[in-house]
Image: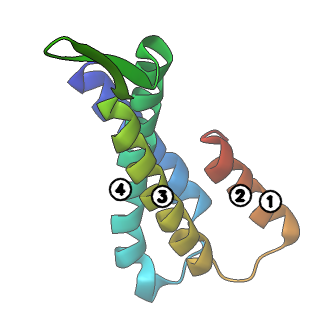
Amino acid sequence: MDRLQKEELIKREIQELTELLSNIEDDIKPFANRLIQQCAFMQVTLQELQETLNEDGSVELYTNGKQNMLKEHPASKTYNTMIKNYNSLIKQLIDMVPETTAEEKDELLDFLGNGKK
């Protein structure tokens, strides 16, 4: 995916998350907006990393002199680190949502869990 495609996907993620989280209290919205931007970036980057891992696999052959060994793919390390941070951001965003009806909360959790509305 090229830079323009990635930026467009990030913008869409930001819009969808902003709509879903529109009922966050005004005094914490600036903080929530920063988290939404980071969350959108991570979501798109995680998708990109998943594509790389699906194509290349999670391990690669490494040659050191006469020895051939398998080592973890660099994208796998990045994915594992980023998914933990992404999940932490999601939790922070969910915690900012005021008490809502079960249906509204389910819609938010579905979106955040699936990356889709």
Tell me, for residue 37, which label it has, or none: 4
* Quarter assignment of residue 46: top left
Horizontal side of residue 53 vs 115, given as left or right: left
* Quarter assignment of residue 33: bottom left
Spatial CA span between label 2 and label 1: 5 Å
**Element type at mark 3:** helix
Tell me, for residue 109, which label it has, or none: 2
Residue most extreme to the front:
66
Tell me, for residue 106, which label it has, or none: 1
Which mark is first along the chain, 4 or 3?
A: 4
Q: Which dot, 1 or 3, sits closer to the camera?
A: 3
Q: Amino acid at mark 2?
A: Leu
Spatial CA span between label 4 and label 2: 18 Å
Spatial CA span between label 1 and label 3: 22 Å
Q: Indicate the position of residue 108 as horizontal and vertical percent values.
A: 69, 58
Spatial CA span between label 3 and label 4: 17 Å
Which mark is first along the chain, 3 or 1?
A: 3
Q: How crowded is the residue under tag 3: few (<14 C-alpha within 10 Å), some, or many (20+)?
A: few
Please give the name of the residue rendered at 47% of the width and 50% of the height, measured from the top-left corner: 83
Task: Name the colour scheme.
Answer: rainbow
